[in-house]
Image (cartoon, rainbow, N blue to C red):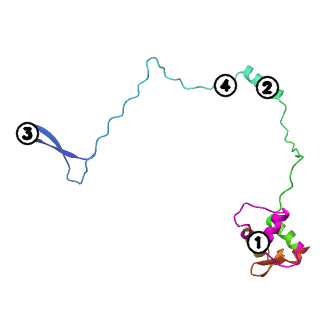
Amino acid sequence: MSKSTKTTTKGKTAAKPAKSGATKTKAKAPAKAKTKPAGAQEAAPATTAAPTNVERATSDAKALAKPAKTSKAKAKPGAKPKAMSCLDAAVSVLKGNNAPMRCKDMVAVMAGKGLWSTTAPTPHATLYSAILREITHKGSKARFVKTERGHFELTSIGNA
């Protein structure tokens, strides 16, 4: 709270702010005390007592009565095989075609044969970047080779 001095003029007391650059602030109303309704009692803190021997025996009996869960993996009769990746689908498309192909053409063939599909707005760009990533990371062991701008074909590794 800022320092202030009181001056009296003709019986009235007025507060003046100190000259140290203090600003006027409104006093906040005091917080109201919460009252309890008549007849309300304070809740006693909950205490946890140790279980008695009888309680332990019944809980142990319940645990023994339930059969243990086994984690057996059940094969679903209509389970689908794992979907083919876009690069694997591109390899299978390029195996059927002996000439270099553009990514848009490869994606059209993949969708037509049902090898690979996506909801991406530009699946050809996804395939293009995946092929370039494989060429960059695997180098001479990559399955693809870039023949000209936007055209790819299989290497001898990819044909095997």
Label 3 close to label 4 by CB (< 8 Å): no
Label 1 close to label 2 by CB (< 8 Å): no
Q: How far apart are the alpha carbons under marks 2 and 3?
A: 88 Å
- Dot 2 falls on a residue whose secondary structure is helix
From which residue to which does the magenta span run? 96-125
Q: Name the front one of labels 1 and 2.
A: 1
92 magenta-colored: no
Badge 1 is on which residue?
104
In the visual, does 38 lie left or right of 14? right
Residue 114 location (% of width, % of height) = 84, 61
In the visual, does 13 lie left or right of 65? left
- Residue drawn 70% across the image and 67% down it: 122
Q: How far apart are the alpha carbons under marks 3 and 4?
A: 75 Å
* Amino acid type, residue under disc 1 in the picture: Lys
Q: Name the front one of labels 2 and 3.
A: 3
* Amino acid type, residue under disc 3 in the picture: Lys
Q: Is residue 25 above or below residue 143?
A: above
Residue 62 location (% of width, % of height) = 79, 25
Q: Which mark is residue 50?
A: 4
Badge 2 is on which residue?
62
Tell me the quarter of the picture where residue 128 sits: bottom right
- Dot 3 falls on a residue whose secondary structure is loop
- Residue drawn 85% across the image and 70% down it: 93
Q: Which mark is residue 10?
A: 3
Q: Which mark is residue 16?
A: none
Label 4 close to label 1 by CB (< 8 Å): no
